[in-house]
Image (cartoon, grey):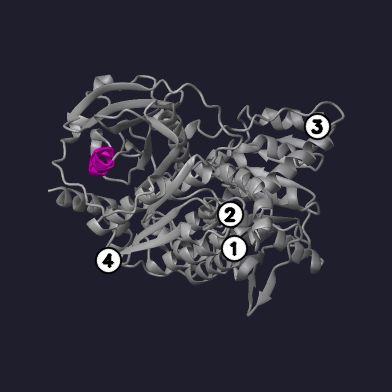
Amino acid sequence: MARNRVSLVAIVLLVFAMNAWSADPPKLLPGDAAIERYLQQETRRISQRFLDGATTRTEWEARKPRLRREYFDMLGLWPLPEKTPLHATTTGTVDRGDVVIEKLHFQSRPGLYVTGNLYRPKKNNGKLPAILYLCGHSGRGRDGNKTAFQDHGMWFASNGYICLLIDTLQLGEIAGKHHGTYNLGRWWWQARGYTPAGVECWNGVRALDYLVSRPDVDADRLGVTGISGGGAATMWISAADERVKVAVPVSGMSDLESYVSHKVINGHCDCMFMVNTYQWEWTTIAALIAPRPLLFANSDNDRIFPMDGNRRIIAQLRQAYKMYDKPELVDDYVSKGGHDYRPDLRIAVFKWFNKHLKHDSGAVKDADFKPLEGKELRAFPEDKDIPKDALNGKIDETFVPRAVVKLPKKGEFAEWKNGLLKELREKSFRALPKEIPPLQEKAGRFVSEGEMEVDLTSIAVSPEPKGLLVVEKGLLEKMKTLKMVFGEENQWMLFPRGVKGGEWTRKSPPNYVERSHALLGRTVDEGRVWDIIAAIKHLQKEKKAPRRVIGVGTAGILAAYAALFEPSIKEIVIVDPPISHRDGPIFLNVLRVLDIPDALGLLAPRPLTLINAKDKAFDRTAEIYRLAGAADKLQRK
């Protein structure tokens, strides 16, 4: 009976992944081949950076403090949040003979509720090793994911452990969202530096806080495990918290080659990924666990964690553990079958914990019990019991703090500006080189970074075009309005990557191209900033450089950022500017640094014209220009 239940869980775990492959393949667009080559090229480049380039234990240990800060930062957890009171509450218990199940909840931060079940032996006179079990996506509604994995709690408690199973943010008793960029269009998650992986990691760290606060838990013998999303969370938490002594991720991590080059990202929601700001080779996350005991468990026919990726990861992990002279503390286990638990896989997990937390290498039997109805395991039995202050459904709005930029003091504008530009480089534009080469002409077309095709066309009615107009999709319909604003068609027109002739397939879900960029430490819009600068450099080389760069809507903000990083751009004109990066353009972490009105202020003292910028938000841009002594250089029409 237990086995049939788990098989149903596996079906739910795979539903969204199967959708990515089940539909008929879309008709290819002109830019599909180029963007895929580009993504594969970047994947190969970053994949060479395992252990941040360290080849010895001394080099690795020297890098680890910085890498840990970067790791927390990419989860949206740096600076580390305050550990506020947990307010842990047990709402009921269930007696299962030799095992007692406690139904409980705590707050990992005020209003962020974590619901769970704690399994413990009924008879116990001392401190026991404890397991934090992290759930995959099981679709149990108000009962929460934890009810689908109760056999693990029962096994551990029946074999001398405390075991806490906690719900994930999505599909928990108080549901939030994991699918922001997968199918909900919440691209501002990338601009905010938000990922639900950060929530799952923090909830797990606070779950460990709860466990070590209990008198029946041995704080020196803590283990973590889980499958699928729970396997990923096992990696997140074990890498983040050294209190974890033993880790067993099950089918929870692949590498960039699988995710991007082989498009395995299409089978995963956002809880599986951090925002890869620092362009890590993915296995470096797991290497942070070394030399603590780690069993890397997988299945040989798992479509969303394919074996070629598993083999690359375990080979790299063996390399890391060998540096510590502890090769015996890392191993892999491969079960035969798909994305699911089977008895042999569970037994391998249990044996690893017994060996490393209890020094017991004896035989192990799988769990055998009659599962409870999910409703019996709810921490909040009825809908009316759910706390009114719960923030789970909107935690993406507040989990990563937005930047609060203080205006420069009189006489300190240059220092203020340079500080923000430096932060933008570090947080949002690390992939943008300081010197961008000009566009190259190849076979009658222009190419930018990585052979990305762009279109640069002169529509001048005089020998010297006055401006470079950045064109995004849908802008051509507004050309009549542009003529009214600018008069004659006296411009160069730039169609950056993904627009004219270089369009790639856009399908939501899985948003392959845009989501893959974030795994490589960049965004499509960052690439378009590159294209604008490359076009300006080309026109300068040809001695045809325009006086100004012009854009409508988000294209205007792209033009502004190009000017921030390319001083030779002398003037910027923006029509209908959005008031926030929440509405685009999207750059990684940009809202942790500044927002659009501040960014426009950084252009001072260069001339800036804003047309239809009626929102009061742009009063801030005007104030920055005034503080820079350049109030006359900003026009609002």
Q: Which mark is residue 521?
A: 2
Residue identified by numbered label 4: 336
Q: Is 130 situated above or below 315?
A: above
**3D distance between C-alphas at marks 2 and 1:** 10 Å
> Circle 2 — which element?
loop
The residue segment tinted magenta is 145-159
Q: Is 443 situated above or below 262?
A: below
Name the residue type under label 3.
Ala
- Mark 3, other Cα within 10 Å: few <14 / some 14–19 / many ≥20: some
Q: Earlier in the sequence, mark 1 or mark 4?
A: 1
Residue identified by numbered label 3: 631
Q: Earlier in the sequence, mark 3 or mark 2?
A: 2
Residue at image coords 54%, 39% = 582
Q: Earlier in the sequence, mark 1 or mark 3?
A: 1
Residue at image coords 54%, 35% = 400
- Mark 1, other Cα within 10 Å: few <14 / some 14–19 / many ≥20: many
